[in-house]
Image (cartoon, grey):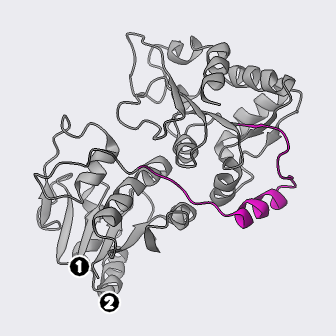
Amino acid sequence: MNKLLIVGPAWVGDMVMAQCLFKLIKQRQPETQIDVLAPAWSLPLLARMPEVKNAIVMPLGHGQLDLKTRYRLGKQLRAAHYDQAMVLPNSFKSALVLWFARIPRRTGWRGEMRWGVLNDIRYLDKKRYPLMIERFMALALDKNEKLPANYPLPELQISAASQQEALTNHHLTSPTHPVLALCPGAEFGPAKRWPEEYYAAVANAKLQEGWDVWLFGSPKDQETTNKIMQLTQNRCVNLSGKTSLAEAVDLLSLSTCVVSNDSGLMHIAAALRKPLVAVYGPTSPTFTPPLHDAAKILQLSLECQPCFQRECPLKHQRCMRDLLPQQVLTAMQQVV
């Protein structure tokens, strides 16, 4: 049996998309054991990916070097006798643990001049691999081998027991009406956020039709969701900052439709195979689109798009403000 260690990404959406790589490896070599070295927050996602055997916590946060800790972890991993490792982040430090672990074959993109720490270095042709998932999956292939015609897409596995536990923990009952899940936050920055009043307009329209509306997000999104609550006369269920990531995944799996900014929750909704409307402004779906056939991408075609800035450099955020609630409601009718 081949034993493989993969260093996972540091962001929610990227970790979801990494499942494409895990699934491709299992398709090609079903007996391969896949372990993933990843941040502690990602464990609920990895637990819902049946391709992953073990999730190993990376004790250092994003950007921390701490050579002593990396050496200690690498030394511990030697006992697992991995045959190969793959590193998905492009930083030099992310590959160091694999070198310290003395894993015979260490595969990754060149990144930050990683000669030596990696001995199976790949040179990225961005035109050949425009999508992030293609860059992940290419690491499982020989250097000149073509990607499969049909990509294996993320699909998180949910249990009825975990759904019920999440409902109970948040004093909810199993839905008897359609549920609209709104994900109005974005870790990247305010430029990626569709206006709160637009989310509220969509919520009010669906509440009028008899839907339930649940608001999702991190503690950082509570100011945004509180505004939506005010604009909907507190008729939504505000879960922002109150759920663990595991609970957010399980509750999202109960929704009828999801409306989201380009965010980690958008990728989770796609991996749950939920009808989805994804609102794009300063970023582009040409690199990290929602990976689901029942996803509708809404994006304008302004000259200033995409700028990939955390805040609108022109101070008008027209890429989001000119995309109106009725367009989202129409898109919802198309995907549900």
Q: Please report the bounds of the magenta region as a residue range.
A: 153-180
Is residue 48 placed above or below 230 in the rendered structure? below
Left-right relation of 328 to 130? right
Please tell me in which quadrant of the rendered image residue 198 appears: top right
Please tell me in which quadrant of the rendered image residue 213 appears: top right
Q: Amino acid at mark 1?
A: Asp
Please tell me in which quadrant of the rendered image residue 185 appears: top right
Count residues near mark 1 (Cα–Cα under 10 Å), then give few for <14, some for 14-19, many for 20+: some
Percent across and percent down for residue 245 are 63, 56
Residue with the mark numbered 1: 83
Choose between 46 and 89: the one closer to the eye.
46
Percent across and percent down for residue 194 are 60, 24
Distance between mark 1 and mark 2 Cα atoms: 12 Å
Q: Amino acid at mark 2?
A: Ala
Left-right relation of 306 to 198? left
Is residue 331 placed above or below 150 in the rendered structure? above
- Residue 67 visible? The answer is no
Assign the N terminus to one quadrant of the image. Answer: bottom left
Percent across and percent down for residue 312 are 48, 20
Residue with the mark numbered 2: 79
Question: Marks 1 and 2: which is nearer the front?
Answer: 1
Task: Name the element at disc 1.
Answer: loop
Which residue: 72% across, 40% down? Answer: 222
